[in-house]
């Protein structure tokens, strides 16, 4: 499959490379812990999702093992359907780690994503919900999903407008599905160095979730997927249950 990297294709990591991944991971966990403490939260309840785009099975396996040894909640997330196949590598297969899909999804990739992901983060428009439901029905699977919300209002980002009125129709559509179960919301924070704007975009997701719970009885919306390598502290302070980290653990992506 195009884009697939297996452990047989890449040289083994040396001790220094493995140590570098572990050191970076410990730095990330320390950031999560400090932010959780400031917010009066238990950091152990926050899922650290490893964003594995362009990463080799060997790199991913090192990070997973380190997270497991530290007793943290773990998931792995792909944002390109063409890279899903690498998770069948012997280093990663059947490791018990939840698998998520976190990228913008095209309808023609719904089959692969349904087969791979226990949780799909990026239901950002009605046709994606329909494609996922159709493929889940054909595969006789049930999957959890997050509704993506564009809390920053940036045109480059997908997602529903950050109002209860805009999100309610897709929420009700998913609630009626026999194959897809809405369990929370997802957003990508504002792309700016203005901390107040970033905080507003992330805190706004939590506020919207709370409104949906109050107005629509949507108590099943427990997950808030928000925060990445650059803004994870703010996300944790604002209530993230899943933070998505890639470069902060693995270093800069390969060209």
Image: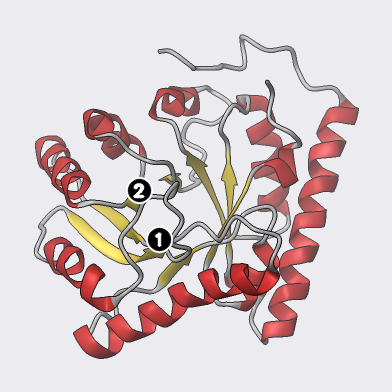
Residue 138: percent from left, percent from top? 10, 35
Q: Hey, which quadrant is residue 181 in on the image?
A: bottom left
Q: Is residue 116 left or right of residue 165?
A: right
Of residue 184 and residue 231, the one placed in the foreground of this image is 231
Of residue 73 and residue 34, the one placed in the foreground of this image is 34
Image point (37%, 78%), residue name: 209
Circles 2 and 1: CB atoms closer than 8 Å: no
Kindly report the distance in space between the C-alpha atoms of the residues bearing marks 2 and 1.
23 Å
In this view, the residue farthest toward the bottom is 214
Report whether residue 240 is seen: no
What kind of colouring is applied to the model shown? secondary structure
Residue 210: percent from left, percent from top? 37, 84
Secondary structure, mark 1, is loop
Q: Is residue 141 above or below residue 221?
A: above
In this view, the residue farthest toward the top is 9
Q: Hey, which quadrant is residue 131 in on the image?
A: top left
Q: Quadrant of the C terminus?
A: top right
Crowding near the residue tagged with mark 2, few <14, some 14–19, many ≥20 C-alpha atoms within 10 Å: some
Residue 201: percent from left, percent from top? 52, 69
Secondary structure, mark 2, is loop
Image point (61%, 26%), residue name: 57
Q: Is residue 243 above or below residue 94?
A: below
Identify the residue under disc 2.
118
Q: Is residue 195 above or below residue 83?
A: below
Total labels drawn: 2
Image point (56%, 60%), residue name: 190
Q: Is residue 210 left or right of residue 134?
A: right
Q: Quadrant of the N terminus?
A: top left
Image point (74%, 71%), residue name: 33
Image mark for residue 150: 1
Q: Is residue 192 above or below residue 255?
A: below
Which circle's residue, 2 or 1, is located before the other in the chain?
A: 2
């Amino acid at each position: 499959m195009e884009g697939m990297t297996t452990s047989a294709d890449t040289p083994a990591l040396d001790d220094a490379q493995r140590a570098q991944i572990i050191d970076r991971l410990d730095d990330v966990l320390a950031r999560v812990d400090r932010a959780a403490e400031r917010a009066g939260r238990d950091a152990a309840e926050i899922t650290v999702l490893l964003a594995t785009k362009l990463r080799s099975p060997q790199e991913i396996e090192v990070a997973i093992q380190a997270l497991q040894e530290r007793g943290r909640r773990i998931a792995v997330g792909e944002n390109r359907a063409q890279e899903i196949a690498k998770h069948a590598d012997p280093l990663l297969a059947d490791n018990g780690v939840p698998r998520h899909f976190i990228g913008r999804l095209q309808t023609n990739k719904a089959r692969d994503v349904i087969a791979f992901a226990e949780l799909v983060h990026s239901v950002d428009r009605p046709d994606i919900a329909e494609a996922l439901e159709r493929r889940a029905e054909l595969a006789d699977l049930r999957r959890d999903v997050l509704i993506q919300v564009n809390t920053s209002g940036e045109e480059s980002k997908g997602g529903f407008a950050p109002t209860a009125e805009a999100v309610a129709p897709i929420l009700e559509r998913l609630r009626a599905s026999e194959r897809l179960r809405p369990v929370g919301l997802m957003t990508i924070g504002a792309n700016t160095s203005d901390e107040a704007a970033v905080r507003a975009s992330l805190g706004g997701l939590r506020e919207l979730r709370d409104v949906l719970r109050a107005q629509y009885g949507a108590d099943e919306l427990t997950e808030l997927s928000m925060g990445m390598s650059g803004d994870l502290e703010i996300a944790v302070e604002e209530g993230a249950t899943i933070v998505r980290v890639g470069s902060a653990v693995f270093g800069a992506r390969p060209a």
